[in-house]
Image: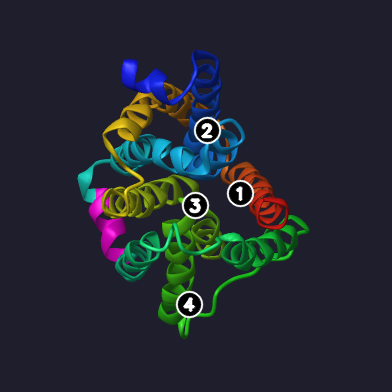
Amino acid sequence: MDILFALLSFETYLLAFVIALGAGVIKGMVGFAMPMILISGLSSVISPELALAGLMLPTLATNGWQALRQGRAAAWQSMKRFRVFMLVGGTAIVLSAQLVRLVDPDTLLLLIAVPVTGFALIQLAGAQLRLPTNGRGLVEALIALLAGAIGGVSGVWGPPTVMYLTALETPKSEQLRIQGVIYGLGALVLFLAHIKSGVVRADTVVFSASLLVPALLGTWVGFQLHERIDQAAFKKVTLVVLLIAALNLMRRALLG
């Protein structure tokens, strides 16, 4: 605890605790947005680098839980189905994470925020955008490349992934599991990459570990809410959260 409160005050930590709890609720309900909520909320009270370190373990733990809720066999099937996405995205995370102190992420955030905002608005308006059967592998690889490149720098790679899964009309339980698998492996890669970058250190990992309890508790609450909504409601909630996430990324890119 001495290490933790050498980094931040007790009042600041309480705010971080509440932010992690709220991020967990949204995470459990729609399967994503924890890194976005954590990096945005925490960055308002602590340094962006410490906020990035803080999201590491909660993101890793909640995604592991999310991926394995329906068993290892189901998780393995998801891994096989989306192996291109995970391979390309993971590679992009490793490479871009090493640039976290060299590259201004604002331009990269805009590259993801603008198309995701457009996608969410079009879907909420009632239009159905579906991916063509031909060339789907290339589309998957390009979206994974974009998601990984942004994720390594900012810790946020959910919006393009959700956009892709929503366009595939993925059933809600499967979408939650697939997101857990993709984000879980991505979170592991991100954690290891930032050990090398210096973001994850002995002191910052203590802060990240301290956010596990609120993040996991919030995720459990979110899972209960997820079970109570149907596919149509799930898609609408997902799109609303996706739109908020994209607008927030745009705000970060334009206003800092």
> Residue at label 3?
156
Residue kind at label 4, given as amino acid type: Val
Bounds of the magenta segment? 74-81
> Residue at label 4?
139
* Number of residues whose C-alpha sits closer than 10 Å to that of mark 1, classed few (under 14), some (14–19) or many (20 or more): many
Q: Foreground residue, 222 or 128?
A: 222
Kindly check if marks 2 and 1 are in contact, taking CB atoms under 8 A apart as contact: no
- The furthest residue to the bottom: 134
Residue kind at label 1, given as amino acid type: Lys
Q: Position of residue 204 (x, y in %)?
A: 35, 34
Residue 148's place in the image compared with 64, above or below, is: below
Q: Earlier in the sequence, mark 4 or mark 3?
A: 4
Between tags 4 and 3, which lies in front?
A: 3
Q: CA distance from mark 1 to mark 3?
A: 21 Å
Q: Which mark is residue 105?
A: none
Whether residue 5 sits left or right of residue 242 in the image: it is left
Residue 81's place in the image compared with 141, above or below, is: above
Between tags 2 and 1, which lies in front?
A: 2
Between tags 1 and 3, which lies in front?
A: 3
> Residue at label 2?
23
Kindly check if marks 1 and 3 are in contact, taking CB atoms under 8 A apart as contact: no
Q: CA distance from mark 2 to mark 4?
A: 29 Å
Q: CA distance from mark 4 to mark 3?
A: 20 Å
Q: Earlier in the sequence, mark 2 or mark 3?
A: 2
Q: CA distance from mark 2 to mark 1?
A: 19 Å
